[in-house]
């Protein structure tokens, strides 16, 4: 692995690379592990708030050369196609020539139809669909508001994407049951033409408490699953992207001196905006949570404050202070820091009760296990090389939805 010169602490100027916009908190279904506290609220973000947000971003000079805008948290497709046509056109009109904007949706897939596919194609939108595998796995947790399984509607949406040549990836939440079924999961993905896959492990967030996440055997079971799935996926030759591996590889094997960014700990690198214009940074799941000590994790409201004011509030906040302390603690104590960069603040909060701690089950699964699995594979290849075989391990080409897939840990 590269050395531990991961950049932390002093961020002279924000570099906004990802904007997570909540068009509405409302979701049309009710997954059992959903952590969103406000998912019955049908309020929709105003076009004027979207305009103001991007005016501020572009005027700040803090936008990276490419910004990914993720429309997420609730279900973004409950807002009409026409809303996004107007919002995308407004953003495009304001966009400086030096900044490329890539839109992306994370959706449960149940509302996808041809109109949506036209929008996706026209604007080259990245699409991530939450799909937990075949019907018996998916319907365990992904329920309608009346308690029925949603598999049929989600798979219809996926087939519509394929019929209309729209690229997509899926995010599958692994449960107790699916962790033992890498073969069955891969067969299912291949049978549905799914070739870009991301895994989340059912975790405790907000009101949802996972029995799986804290089990002592989890690290071993998940490593076994990932090792087997990756092996089978490569053997099939039909899977282009397994996020857990393909995003870890370039972080592990990068040029000396190049830091691995962790945008979840950089002020404003990830800008999260709810449907009322409230702004947070760091982990997007913090938006909507309550905590008087951290002013509900809010840094301001884009309708009433400038980004400069929001940044000043952020830098002076207990939130930033404590997240930074947690990153420093990681840097001092963890062998995986050079790959991870200090983890996901929201998971430290949920699992350890504080931003200032270090290891979590979440980082064990998302950072430590993939790193170990990849290093094991390299060891095996190195041994084969010594007996004259050619090594074959290399990162898959990163698909167009990579940035969104990277951030979309939300189930
Ligand atoms: S892997 Fe966990 S303990 Fe290590 S740096 Fe990341 S968050 Fe910290």
Image: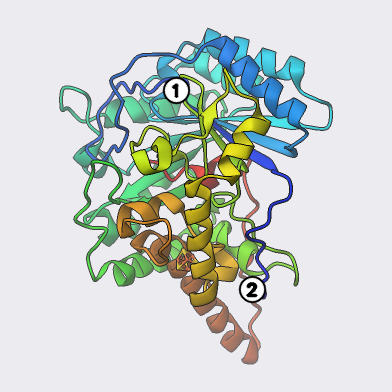
User: How far apart in space, not on screen, are marks 2 and 1 (Cα)?
Assistant: 38 Å
* Residue at 29% from the left image edge and 50% from the top image edge: 202
Q: Residues within 10 Å of mark 1 (few under 14, many from 20)?
A: many
Q: Determine which residue is flagged by label 1.
A: 76
**Foreground: 332 or 246?**
332
Question: Looking at the image, which residue sits at the far left?
Answer: 147
Eyeballing the image, is 332 above or below 308?
Answer: below
Residue 188 visible: no
Eyeballing the image, is 213 above or below 402?
Answer: below
Eyeballing the image, is 156 above or below 205?
Answer: above
Q: Residues within 10 Å of mark 2 (few under 14, many from 20)?
A: some
* Residue at 61% from the left image edge and 41% from the top image edge: 268
Image quadrant in which you'd find residue 363: bottom left
**Quadrant occupied by the N terminus:** bottom right
Eyeballing the image, is 374 above or below 17?
Answer: below
**Foreground: 40 or 238?**
40
Q: Determine which residue is flagged by label 2.
A: 4
- Residue 60 in picture, x, y percent from top left: 74, 31
Earlier in the chain: of badge 2 and badge 1, it is: 2
Q: Which mark is residue 106?
A: none
- Residue 26 in picture, x, y percent from top left: 34, 21
Label 2 beta carbon less than 8 Å to ligand 1: no
* Residue at 33% from the left image edge and 47% from the top image edge: 173
């Amino acid at each position: 692995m590269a050395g531990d010169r991961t950049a932390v602490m002093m961020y002279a100027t924000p570099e906004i690379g990802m904007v997570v916009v909540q068009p509405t908190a409302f979701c049309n279904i009710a997954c059992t592990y959903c952590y969103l506290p406000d998912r019955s609220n049908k309020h929709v973000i105003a076009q004027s708030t979207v305009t103001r947000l991007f005016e501020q971003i572009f005027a700040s000079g803090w936008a990276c050369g490419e910004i990914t805008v993720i429309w997420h948290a609730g279900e973004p497709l409950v807002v009409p196609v026409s809303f996004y046509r107007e919002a995308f056109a407004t953003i495009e009109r304001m966009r400086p020539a030096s900044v490329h904007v890539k839109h992306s949706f994370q959706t449960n897939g149940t509302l996808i139809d041809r109109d949506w596919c036209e929008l996706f194609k026209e604007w080259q939108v990245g699409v991530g669909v939450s799909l937990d595998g075949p019907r018996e796995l998916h319907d365990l947790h992904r329920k309608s508001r009346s308690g029925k399984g949603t598999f049929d509607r989600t798979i219809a949406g996926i087939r519509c994407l394929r019929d209309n040549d729209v690229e997509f990836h899926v995010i599958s939440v692994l449960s107790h049951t699916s962790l033992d079924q890498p073969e069955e999961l891969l067969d299912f993905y291949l049978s549905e033409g799914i070739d870009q896959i991301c895994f989340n492990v059912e975790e405790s967030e907000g009101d949802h408490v996972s029995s799986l996440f804290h089990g002592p055997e989890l690290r071993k079971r998940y490593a076994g699953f990932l090792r087997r799935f990756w092996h089978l996926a490569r053997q099939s030759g039909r899977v282009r992207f397994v996020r857990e591996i393909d995003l870890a590889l370039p972080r592990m094997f990068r040029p000396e001196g190049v830091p691995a960014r962790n945008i979840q700990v950089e002020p404003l690198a990830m800008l999260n905006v709810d449907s009322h214009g409230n702004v947070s940074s760091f982990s997007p799941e913090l938006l909507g949570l309550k905590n008087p000590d951290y002013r509900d994790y809010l840094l301001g409201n884009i309708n009433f404050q400038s980004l400069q004011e929001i940044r000043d509030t952020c830098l002076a906040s207990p939130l930033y202070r404590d997240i930074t302390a947690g990153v420093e603690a990681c840097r001092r104590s963890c062998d995986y820091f050079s790959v991870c960069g200090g983890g996901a603040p929201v998971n430290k909060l949920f699992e350890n009760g504080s931003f200032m701690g270090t290891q979590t089950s979440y980082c064990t699964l998302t950072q430590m296990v993939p790193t170990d699995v990849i290093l094991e594979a390299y060891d095996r290849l190195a041994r084969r090389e010594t007996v004259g075989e050619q090594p074959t391990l290399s990162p898959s080409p990163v698909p167009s939805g990579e940035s969104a897939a990277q951030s979309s840990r939300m189930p």
